[in-house]
Amino acid sequence: MREAVIQWACLYGPLVSAGLLGSWIRPDKLHATGLLFSLAWNAAMLPWLDGLAQWVGLWSYHSAGPAIGGMPLALYFGWVLAWGLVAPLLGHALGNRPWTAAALMVAIDLRVMPEMTPVLRLSHHWWLGEILVVIGLLLPSMLLSSWT
């Protein structure tokens, strides 16, 4: 039961947040294009960086459901939505402050990831993986969104 709740929250939390922020901000075509680039970057790079973090032993997943590279699909789509749509939309909502939004998203991630047991098991050095994905996913996606 706990596994299902974690996976639903990881998927639907970012999905609802992106929907609410998108309906509030109503991005124009140029901003929507930037969001598409940001989303695509996260969707393409997340399996590679997550796989590297798993290979190094920073974290592992334990789920019976469908997965990509060991990561449950609900977590994959939720992470892509959170950092590919929610973070750039939040930056826009905060008055074009992408770095404030990025810092808030990292703070949320640092708080939530340890609570995801049994789906996600973290090593003692899991924060190194967090640094890896922030540098490889979140920051480039914020830049792609704002540069477009």
Image (cartoon, rainbow, N blue to C red):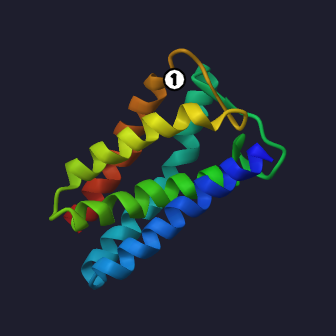
**79 left or right of 103?**
right
Relative vertical location of residue 64 with respect to residue 130 in this rendering, above or below: below
Which residue is drawn at the image coordinates 21% and 48% (left, top)?
99
The extreme top residue here reads 124
**66 left or right of 92?**
right
The extreme right residue here reads 64
Q: Amino acid at mark 1?
A: Trp
Relative image position of residue 82 (x, y in whole percent): 46, 56
Which of 129 and 13 lies nearest the eye of the viewer? 13
Relative image position of residue 92 (x, y in whole percent): 23, 66
Which of 25 and 43 lies nearest the eye of the viewer? 25
Q: How many badges with numbers are in the image?
A: 1
Asked which secondary structure carries label 1, the reply is helix
Relative image position of residue 49 (x, y in whole percent): 52, 38
Which residue is drawn at the image coordinates 62% and 28% (left, top)?
54
| Among the 4 quarters of the image, the one containing residue 71 | top right
Relative image position of residue 58 (x, y in whole percent): 57, 23
Which residue is drawn at the image coordinates 27% and 75% (left, top)?
31
The C terminus appears in which quarter of the rendering?
bottom left
Q: Alpha-carbon neighbours of circle 1 within 10 Å: few (<14), some, or many (≥20)?
A: many
| Among the 4 quarters of the image, the one containing residue 123 | top right
Which residue is drawn at the image coordinates 46% and 54% (left, top)?
42
**25 left or right of 38?**
left
**79 left or right of 137?**
right
- Please name the residue that numbered disc 1 is placed on: 126
